[in-house]
Image: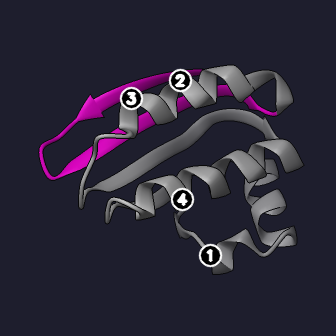
Amino acid sequence: MQFRVKDEGTSVHVSLDGQLNFAANEDFQSLLSQLGGLKGRKVTFEMSGLSHIDSVGLGLLYIAREDLAENGSSINLAHPRDNVLRMLELTEAHKTFEITR
């Protein structure tokens, strides 16, 4: 997985590319370290570049949600591909996360 972070003032846009799975754990932890200082910001994870997400990747999103919520920030999952959206819906993650299609 690769990511790009763009600070837009009151919000942060994070583009995710590749696969969000166990192999992405270290990269995702690096991303969370970069986002750790945010306070009260909306963080949008642009997911159109993700070709796959598995249960570990989903767990990483929940960790990100908890970490960012501690500082008053929120997460939006934007534009997931059909197969990624299906995983989010099957696991009922759409009840926890704001998802923009």
> What amino acid is at disc 1?
Thr
Dot 4 or dot 3, earlier in sequence: 3
Where 58 sits versus 100, above or below? above
> Which quadrant holds residue 53?
top right
Residue under circle 4?
A: 65
Q: From this viewpoint, is residue 54 visible?
A: no
Q: Earlier in the sequence, mark 4 or mark 1?
A: 4
The percent position of residue 24, horizontal first and vertical second, equals 73, 25
Q: Which residue is mark 1?
A: 96
Which residue shows up at 81% across the image and 33% down it?
21
CA neighbours of label 2 inside 10 A, class few (<14), some (14 to 19), many (20+): few
Question: Which residue carries the number 3 mark?
Answer: 34
* Amino acid found under the numbered disc labelled 3: Gln
From the image, state whether disc 2 or disc 1 is nearer to you.
2
Determine whether the residue tagged by mark 4 lies in a helix, strand or loop.
helix
Residue bounds of the magenta highlight:
1-21
